[in-house]
Amino acid sequence: MKSSINTNRRDFIRTGSLSAAVLLLSSKLSALAVPGKKLGVALVGLGGYSSGQLAPALQHTNNCYLAGIVTGTPAKATEWAHKYNIAPKNIYNYQNFDAIAGNKDIDIVYVVLPVSMHKEYTIRAARAGKHVICEKPMALNAADCREMIAACKKANRLLSIGYRLHFEPHTQEVMRLGQKHVFGKVTKIDTGNGFVYNGDPNAWRLKKALSGGGGLMDMGIYAIQGSRYTLGQEPVAVKATQQKTRPDFFKEVDETIFWELKFPGGAKVTGKSSYNDNWGYLNVEAEKGKFALEPAYGYGGLDGTINGKPMKIPNIIQQAAQMDDFAICVKLNKQSRVPGEEGLKDMKVVDAIYRSLDSGKWESVG
Ligand code: NAD
């Protein structure tokens, strides 16, 4: 059944397979190698995202490579060791994970687990002396994000969130157009992200204790990000409503949520997230022009328009660019452009959206 959700996600998120041409282009666009050895990355959790995206992307990186794995399933360990030539001493399980501290092959631990486990494994990895990439959403709530940031600071390790779109050229163009007021100030944003979830009803994504929530935590986080990086501002308040058409299936987590965000610049910003609708768009209106992305948030190729004309921007392997950039940050000891603080900013908005659903009122963000 797990493959069913992954297939659904793939069908939605990917809009086509990466062709040889895209791969070639992508390798030209990915980060140049910075002097020094390639850094070793250990993936923690070998589920859909690690196996379908991160491990393949690590075959296209210039500054880091897949050196280790952490898995609770011995059969996966054997399969991955063979497929990716991983040394037996670089294979861990959840019980002996802390022994990774003594392993000089591993520089970066990448946490790709259910959301409820992000905090624990980020903190354990930092305490083991490793730099950390943690998948989105960063944690169950903003308070946990703060603990993770503090633990990495205390251990003097860098922390980054798996926000691959910050390295993606269509997204970077939207950031430029919006933040630099290329068509004047942004006046209106409407964005949505979601897919129709028909997977395993017992999967962690539908268990509140493991996921923290449904469509909002998983997909809405991108739409929140989209509004924030288009404007380059932080929202101050939010009002949200929700809809559940399949309450028997989404027993514990949200299905569809609609929100309005108040930003200091006064732009009218609406967003929505869903486990019951296929959305993935970002529409932006400015004083003297408009621009849009659709698909806006996936990794199978983004597309966009500026004043109705195609952007004509190449697609890249986002995860390769993202991991290469973090490896460079580690080599140069500089903060990632998507540090833990960036994950915290989104979780403050998520927390406020859930508070607004409870209160039925506008709630301030953090
Ligand atoms: P998945 O269910 O396919 O994989 C989860 C992995 O965690 C599995 O290998 C599973 O065995 C392991 N695991 C360990 N303990 C577990 C437990 N107690 N319960 C359930 N699983 C347990 O999930 P996924 O799609 O790979 O997602 C993992 C993380 O990656 C999530 O945080 C998700 O939001 C994120 N993700 C990010 C993107 C992106 O585009 N950045 C895409 C997909 C997933």
Image: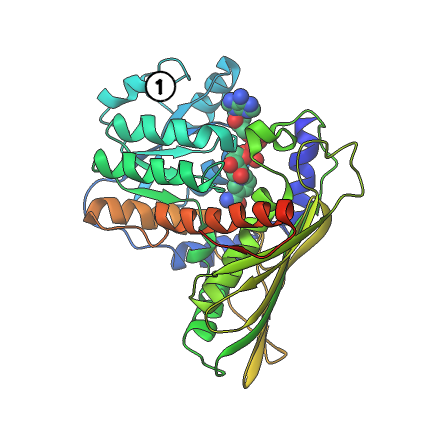
Residue 293 rendering spot, x and y as whole percentages: 59, 66
How many discs mark residues in the rendered view?
1
Residue 48 appears in the picture as rendered:
no
Residue at the image position 41 percent from the left and 23 percent from the top: 70
Q: Is mark 1 on a helix, strand or loop?
A: helix
Q: Which residue is drawn at 50% across and 65% down?
A: 170
304 or 37, which lies in front? 304
* Residue for badge 1: 97
**Quarter of the image containing the N terminus?**
top right
- Residue 33 visible within the image: yes
Q: Residue at x 62, y 59 (%)?
A: 271
Relative placement, left or right, of 248 versus 312 is: right
Q: For the residue marked with disc 1, what is the amino acid?
A: Phe
**Where is residue 265 drawn, in percent x and y?**
47, 73
Q: How is the image coloured?
A: rainbow
357 relative to 43, above or below: below
Q: Foreground residue, 179 or 176?
A: 179
Q: Nearer the viewer, residue 222 or 271?
A: 271
In the rendered image, which quarter is residue 331 located in?
top left
Q: In this view, does 72 lie above or below 346?
A: above
Instruction: Describe residue 348's horizontal placement relative to residue 108 as left or right.
Output: right
- Across and down, in percent, residue 96 comes to 35, 14
Q: Horizontal placement of 18 versus 90: left or right? A: right
